[in-house]
Image (cartoon, grey):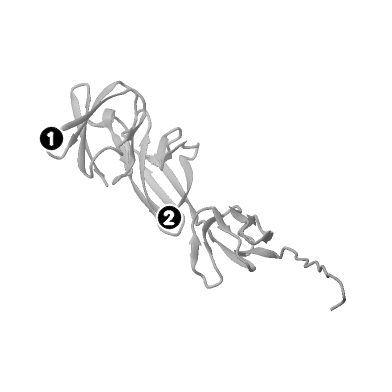
Amino acid sequence: MPAENVTVNANFEIIGYTVAAVVNPVGAGTVEGTGVYNFGDAVTLTASANTGYQFVNWTDSENQVLGTELTYAFSMPAGDVTVNAIFELINEFTVTFNLTHAGSPVQGANITFDEQELVTDENGAASFILANGTYDYLITKEGYEDAQGQVVVDGSDKLVEIEMISGISSEGLISIMVYPNPAQEQINLVRSHTQPVTLEMYTDNGKLVRTESWTTKELKLNIQELKSGLYMIQISDNGTVKTLKFIKQ
């Protein structure tokens, strides 16, 4: 110790810690927000899927799930951080409708399928791209009976061949499809014409809960306020009444 007062400066510096993201599988997407941060900084990572992929979740180095949203936010700890961004392939398949009548293709038919609508070409064909699932369809064309049904997409392309029937059936004017069924928030009704009709919705014990005037081909009904259970929809069209059922989950 010298014979005088001594002042010493203690100099510190902020330690920067690294945030890294690993995209799995490689090439499936990108992550923004990586880099160097200081302890306590707010960090937000944002995932973006490349074409053909969809984001699944964020995981840590021990494969524990950190979140499932496209953004993952956290406060920077006193150490480096590596986060995994997990993506998966979107498996989509082609569903092709081929419409014929007496061996000839039916051109110009309207096909409503999974909330999409296409018109058949000169070969009587129309194709949709869909993921795995069960889908309802409705086919309409003037001079033919309406056709409706379901298609199950289960890991491969599908060919749906339909023989159209000429003329109009006794229910042709009010052939109606309701989907999804069961439903939680909304149901869609699709028909082949736009004549004004009256729609009434009842509970399974006959209580009227809604009345609508329907003047379009498609009608979307919000059912969030309904209690879970079975409901019936009655549609009156020129003295004919059609009854549909759906389940509110």
Secondary structure state at the residue bearing disc 1: loop
- Residue 85: horizontal and vertical position, in percent? 57, 61
- Residue 189: horizontal and vertical position, in percent? 32, 34
Residue farthest along the front direction in this orientation: 3
Separation of marks 1 and 2 at Cα, in angstroms? 36 Å
Callout 1, which amino acid? Gly
- Residue 214: horizontal and vertical position, in percent? 31, 24
Residues 72 and 205: in front is: 72
The residue that label 1 is drawn on is 206
Residue farthest along the bottom direction in this orientation: 1
Q: Are marks 1 and 2 in contact (CB under 8 Å)?
A: no
Q: Nearer the viewer, mark 1 or mark 2?
A: 1
How dense is the environment of label 2, judged by Cα within 10 Å: few (below 14), some, or many (20 and up)? some
Image side of residue 98 versus residue 203, left or right = right
Callout 2, which amino acid? Asn
Residues 165 and 76: in front is: 76
Q: Residue at x 68, y 64 (%)?
A: 18
Residues 20 and 29: in front is: 20
The tag on residue 132 is 2
Is residue 232 positioned above or below 23 on the image? above
Q: Residue at x 43, y 53 (%)?
A: 158
> In the picture, residue 233 is in which quadrant?
top left
Give the mark count: 2
